[in-house]
Amino acid sequence: MRKPSVLSLAASALVAAPLAAVPPAFAEAVCYSTLIEAASTPARLDLDHPAAHITGRLLARRSSTEDPVPVPGATLNVTPNGTVTTAEDGTFATDVRDKSWTALSFPGDGQYCKAATKTVDHPIDQSEVTLTAKREPASDPLQVGDAVTVAGTLTHGTTPASGVKVVLEAAGKDQPKTYATTTGADGAYSITYVPERGGSWSVHAESSLYTKETPKVWGYVRVQDAVPLFSGFTVTPNPAAYSLPVRIRAKLERLDIDGSRRIIGPTWVDVEYSADGKAGWTKVARAWVNAQGEIDSLDLDATKDGYLRLSFPGEELSLTRPGTSEARYLDVRTGTDFTQFNAAPEPVRTGGTLTVSGILLRLAGKAWTPVGSGNKVTIQFRADGATTWTTMGTTTTDRNGAFRKQFTASKKGTWRATYAGNATYTPATSTGDEVVVGTRTAFASGFNASPEPVRKGASLKVAGKLNRYVGDRWVHAGSGAVIQIQFKASGSSTWTTLGTTKTTSAGTFARTFKAVKDGTWRAVYTGSPTYLPATSGTDYVDVR
């Protein structure tokens, strides 16, 4: 619809007068033509003056030669504000709010024809407004799931701006989140939301009929949104011996909202205990986490069966929330251990008899006592250079917890004993005992350093013979065995290797040295994978 220009009201009101008899010129007219006059104040609307007061009158023309006369009691349509009825003098008045124009129309009524629509414009000025914002709670950091309320007012000077849309934008997990509300009659607003992550937020008022869009008011919220992660959590040994310490190890990291993992430390975590692993968790110790995020030095005495877990209280600096590790069940039993374990003789010849023995103990209160008879002990062997243990046989303890078993020696390696344990006793493993296996060697009794005595600076010859025990008799070692010639000065306790030589095909060896000082001489064969080591007798030489 085209909006006509505003017509001003006449300065003086028309006096209503009853219509006279229809003049001859209008005798055949169906109705009198009508005219709407209207104007509004103030001339322009704004936030301080949001209502337009419209006044006007409805006039009818009885003849082309007469002035228009008022139409009393007529109903005008006011778009979009309803209707208004003219007074006895044809005048009317109405108020409209928040509209940039008003259309007045008269549909006609009996002798009065329909009037042309009268449009009244209300130019609107948008005002600069001020938005305030305050966050509650104001303290940081927040826990994940905590709600935040941003509230404030929108005003123009002292005038509240009501009905204006206020929009809050906040950091989201993947993309920004938007929340909106509308100011109340007092210009106040309030938006409550749950931050998905830490980050900045902003709030602003959008433009409205009377107000301009406001600049954004910024804020920041810190949320403990990083998740603690425990890895490598172990409790060893398990089963554990009652009253003896178990060692707790783990690594602590945090999983940030962006998916990256970072070390947490140095810091403290709690060690918690629960009988069933579901409820009743209580703190039993504290564990230190080093700068590498590792727990590697906590020893905790085992006192009862149950579950252990690690609890991180949270950390504001890294914005990491509280969290716990998985639970580990600790099986506490009576402790067992081996003592006096031995594999002998050492060294032993190939094919010789090797006796493995020891005592199995149990921890009764604070004292170690023999386990008694009938407990199965497994004897294991690991060949030199191998990584796996092989079970060589089993035996049982006597009433004193002692055990022994004999084997045929075949190769160099380490022996140990193991006890599998049961529902009452913990498993146990002895220390290892390395045994060298090979053909026995020995130096013949004729080892000699000569001459004796000897003049200082003169030559001194050291000679001897190396034998091997083959089958059931001693034979010469043969050629190529490396012999160390060692010397211990008079008054000293240290042997010094002065040189080496090799045996001849007859097993003999000799080497000449310069005599320097009084002392004792000997020969040493260090052995090989096949032959056992040997040391000769000694020979003292006086140097003059």
Image (cartoon, rainbow, N blue to C red):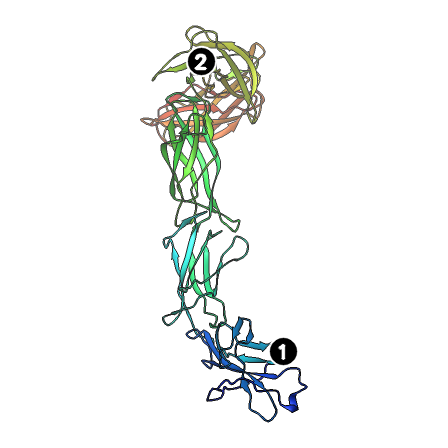
Residue sitting at the far left: 491
Give amino acid for label 1: Met
Can you see residue 496? Answer: no
The one of 269 and 81 positioned closer to us in this rendering: 81
Residue at (42, 53) in percent of width and height: 148
Image-based side of 171 in relation to 298, left or right: right
Q: Which residue is mark 1?
A: 1
Residue at (35, 24) in percent of width and height: 542
Image-based side of 382 in relation to 339, left or right: right
Q: Point out which mark residue 511 bears.
A: none
- Please determine whether, in this image, residue 529 is positioned above or below residue 196: above
Can you see residue 356? Answer: yes
Residue 278 x %, y %: 45, 29
State how far apart marks 1 and 2 are (Cα): 113 Å
Give amino acid for label 2: Gly
Q: Point out which mark residue 358 bears.
A: 2
The one of 414 and 262 positioned closer to us in this rendering: 262
Residue 448 quadrant: top left
Secondary structure under tag 1 reads loop
- Please determine whether, in this image, residue 264 is positioned above or below residue 46: above
Secondary structure under tag 2 reads strand
- Please determine whether, in this image, residue 260 is positioned above or below residue 329: below
Residue at (46, 48) in percent of width and height: 225
